[in-house]
Image (spheres, coloured by chain):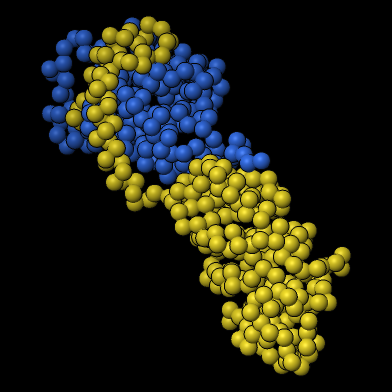
């Protein structure tokens, strides 16, 4: 006589935190490689998720949606930092060429980083989610609001460009 | 720290790691256990919890438990917060969508069928003639639209089962004698039908008037509460007018009813209900 099955309410927030917090912290640790950064983004992403929670229709898309918020925050953060770094570099040219201590193997790494930054947004997000978040194509598709085939194609295109960049 | 973060949100050190996982070798997802050790992740999550609880406290939405029940009055959405029942909505009416929206936007809703079961049982009792469980159920008027509606609905909680007031009388009782139409709107958008008895408001001419849940439901409720309303959907001839202050009840045509001011009158289903509410019959018209 009573039912809750087709309830048009978002799933309980605290339950979603419990279920996803460890893997997201792991993802952020992998994406930022810095304990404090990971903690900052972790807090920010849950606050944002909480505020936008009423817009969620069901429990179905929660995980990719959370990854999407986390990924966007990481991207925003690095964009801010690059902007700040550029200002510093313009003010003090000596910092701009602070690659003097970098050895040969790291040069390739820097090259790859620049190549990732140069990827179109969708390819970059798909690539980061796949490679750093370990998401399945279905999940990436949901997070990026595209088909799984399109998500796969995005990662494939990203890989192709990055391999070319790494090789050349 | 700044110089360690790089394009794409991936810091330099991640790329060293990325090389180890041969990130470009295939399109397999990254191994999920790569990166920090479990114990470190656990410690980070623990420390994040304390910070998050502090940050969230500022804009945490109140928690409510909600469920859907097939009551004898039809399918109902029911939501209860810590201070009492917050929303009751007939799912087959236009009033249901605003109820869902208000709950979704302003509350953390968890599904709890116990609330729905309790409401259904209380409605069963009401339709069997016992309104005590519903009268005793605490209500939370947070979803009430404004001060006017709040005053109108608060006033209604004092109208007992087996009695009704008129739209005009209710408007005058809350100090808005020309607010008859606004009273009608306030009743139509009552977030707690049945529990705040907006079905106990009728038209001054004796017709039972409209209802947010449909006239059929209003009829069922009023009949269950003792009004012998026929197919003409009007007050029955045995209905009597009771004066709240003097505690005297009269026939509708009594001179005393016409003299007295409307806000102080309630209409009872019959003399028995009026006596049950502590009233005595008028000596002029001798009702009942």
Judge from the rendering whether residue B158 lies leftward or rightward of residue B3; answer left or right: right
Q: In this view of the protein, can residue A111 be seen by the observer?
A: no
Q: In this view of the protein, can residue A101 be seen by the observer?
A: yes
Question: Closer to the camera, B108 or B19?
Answer: B108
Question: Which image quadrant is residue A63 in?
Answer: top left
Q: Give coordinates of residue B75: x percent, y percent.
A: 68, 47
In the displayed structure, B70 sits above or below A148; it is below
Q: Quadrant of the C terminus of chain B?
A: bottom right
Residue at x-position 50% and y-position 42%: B110
Q: Give coordinates of residue B10: x percent, y percent.
A: 30, 23
Q: Quadrant of the N terminus of chain B?
A: top left
Judge from the rendering whether residue B5 lies leftward or rightward of residue B180; answer left or right: left
Q: Give coordinates of residue B65: x percent, y percent.
A: 51, 46
The chain painted blue is A
Question: Closer to the camera, A55 or B269?
Answer: B269
Residue at x-position 46% and y-position 25%: A122
Judge from the rendering whether residue B59 lies leftward or rightward of residue B118; answer left or right: left
Question: Closer to the camera, B85 or A52?
Answer: B85
Residue at x-position 28% and y-position 9%: B20
Question: Which image quadrant is residue A166 in?
Answer: top left
Residue at x-position 68% and y-position 45%: B70
The chain painted yellow is B
In the displayed structure, A56 sits above or below A104; it is below
User: How many numbered marks appear?
Assistant: 0
Judge from the rendering whether residue B223 lies leftward or rightward of residue B100; answer left or right: right
Question: Which image quadrant is residue B280 in?
Answer: bottom right
In the displayed structure, A152 sits above or below B236; it is above
Q: Give coordinates of residue A83: x percent, y percent.
A: 27, 35
């Amino acid at each position: 006589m009573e039912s809750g099955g087709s309830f048009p309410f978002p799933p309980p927030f605290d339950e979603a935190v419990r279920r996803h917090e460890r893997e997201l912290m792991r993802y952020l640790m992998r994406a930022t490689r810095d304990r404090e950064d990971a903690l900052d983004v972790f807090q920010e992403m849950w606050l944002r998720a909480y505020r936008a929670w009423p817009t969620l229709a069901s429990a179905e898309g929660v995980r990719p949606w959370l990854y999407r918020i986390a990924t966007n925050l990481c991207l925003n953060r690095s964009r801010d930092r690059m902007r700040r770094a550029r200002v510093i570099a313009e003010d003090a040219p000596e910092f701009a060429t602070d690659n003097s201590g970098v050895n040969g193997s790291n040069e390739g790494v820097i090259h790859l980083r620049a190549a990732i930054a140069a990827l179109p947004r969708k390819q970059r997000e798909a690539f980061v989610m796949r490679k750093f978040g370990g998401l399945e194509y279905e999940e990436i598709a949901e997070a990026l609001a595209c088909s799984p085939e399109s998500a796969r194609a995005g990662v494939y295109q990203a890989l192709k460009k990055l391999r070319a960049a790494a090789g050349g | 720290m700044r110089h360690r973060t790089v394009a794409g949100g991936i810091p330099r050190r991640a790329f060293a790691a990325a090389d180890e996982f041969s990130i470009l070798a295939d399109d397999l997802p990254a191994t999920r256990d790569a990166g920090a050790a479990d114990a470190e992740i656990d410690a980070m999550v623990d420390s994040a919890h304390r910070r998050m609880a502090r940050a969230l406290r500022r804009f945490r939405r109140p928690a409510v438990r909600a469920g859907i029940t097939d009551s004898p009055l039809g399918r109902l959405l029911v939501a209860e917060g810590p201070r009492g029942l917050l929303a009751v909505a007939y799912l087959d009416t236009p009033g249901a969508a605003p109820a869902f929206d208000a709950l979704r936007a302003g509350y953390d809703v968890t599904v709890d069928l116990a609330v729905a079961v309790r409401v259904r049982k209380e409605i069963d009792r009401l339709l069997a003639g016992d309104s005590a469980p519903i009268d005793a159920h605490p209500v939370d008027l947070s979803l009430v639209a404004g001060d006017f509606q709040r005053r109108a609905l608060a006033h209604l909680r004092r109208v007992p089962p087996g009695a009704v007031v008129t739209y005009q009388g209710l408007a005058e009782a809350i100090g808005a004698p020309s607010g008859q139409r606004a009273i009608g709107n306030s009743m139509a958008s009552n977030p707690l039908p049945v529990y705040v008895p907006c079905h106990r408001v009728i038209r001054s001419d004796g017709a039972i008037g409209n209802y947010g849940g449909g006239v059929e439901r209003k009829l069922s409720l009023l009949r269950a509460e003792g009004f012998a309303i026929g197919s003409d959907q009007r007050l029955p001839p045995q209905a009597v007018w009771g004066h709240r202050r003097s505690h005297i009840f009269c026939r509708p045509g009594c001179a005393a009813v016409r003299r007295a001011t409307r806000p102080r009158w309630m209409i009872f289903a019959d003399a028995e209900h009026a006596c049950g509410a502590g009233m005595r019959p008028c000596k002029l018209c001798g009702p009942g």
